[in-house]
């Protein structure tokens, strides 16, 4: 194989590769699922969701809601990265947000299984 052929083959492989998702914060990873880049927790591989009833920068999921849909905790000193930011919850704790919307896991999910996607028409897996 000539050097030119190798360069062309390498370029073709790069063009055929799926686009890389933007950066994710510590504790969250982006994985390929059916050709889409979806968010999961780094620990436990749990799908990450947004809630349509949240406002940008404000969680409306507390108490019983937060028991069923645990907030994805951020550390107080975590900083925004790409589309990810940190919001303050009503109890003062820090929570990750995607494009301003707080993110959660679902208590009934198992690793890699997004059983809460579309629930009530208001819960959606984070897709980048």
Image (cartoon, rainbow, N blue to C red):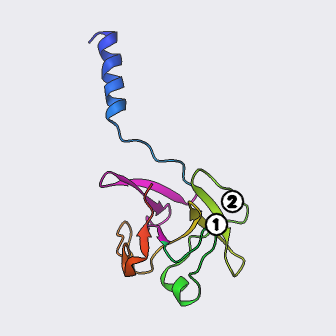
114 versus 17 height, above or below: below
Residue depicted at 49% across the width and 74% down the height: 51
In percent of width and height, residue 118 lies at 36, 74
Does the magenta run of residues contain 13? Answer: no
Residue interval drawn in magenta: 26-50
105 versus 20 height, above or below: below
25 versus 97 height, above or below: above
Residue depicted at 55% across the width and 83% down the height: 66
> Where the C terminus falls, by quadrant?
bottom left
In percent of width and height, residue 90 lies at 69, 80
Circle 2 crowding by C-alpha within 10 Å: few under 14, some 14–19, many from 20:
some
Q: Nearer the viewer, residue 27 or 23?
A: 23
Say what secondary structure mark 2 lies in: loop
> Where the N terminus falls, by quadrant?
top left
Q: Are marks 1 and 2 in contact (CB under 8 Å)?
A: yes
Does the magenta run of residues contain 33? Answer: yes
Residue 5, disc: none
Residue matched to label 1: 74
Residue matched to label 2: 78
Circle 1 crowding by C-alpha within 10 Å: few under 14, some 14–19, many from 20:
many
Q: Residue furthest bottom?
A: 64
8 versus 33 height, above or below: above
In percent of width and height, residue 22 lies at 51, 47
Residue depicted at 67% across the width and 76% down the height: 89
Residue depicted at 29% across the width and 55% down the height: 34
Based on the displayed image, in which of its 4 quarters is residue 77 positioned? bottom right
Q: Nearer the viewer, residue 109 or 37?
A: 37
Say what secondary structure mark 1 lies in: loop
Based on the displayed image, in which of its 4 quarters is residue 86 positioned? bottom right
């Amino acid at each position: 194989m000539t050097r030119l052929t190798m360069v062309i083959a390498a370029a073709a492989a790069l063009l055929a590769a799926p686009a890389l998702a933007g950066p994710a914060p510590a504790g969250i990873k982006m994985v390929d699922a059916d050709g889409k880049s979806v968010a999961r927790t780094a620990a436990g591989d749990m799908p990450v969701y947004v809630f349509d009833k949240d406002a940008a920068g404000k969680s409306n999921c507390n108490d019983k809601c937060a028991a069923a849909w645990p907030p994805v905790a951020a550390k107080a000193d975590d900083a925004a990265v790409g589309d990810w930011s940190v919001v303050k919850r009503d109890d003062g704790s820090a929570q990750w947000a995607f494009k301003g919307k707080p993110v959660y896991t679902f208590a009934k999910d198992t690793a890699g299984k997004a059983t809460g996607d579309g629930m009530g028409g208001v819960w959606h897996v984070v897709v980048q």
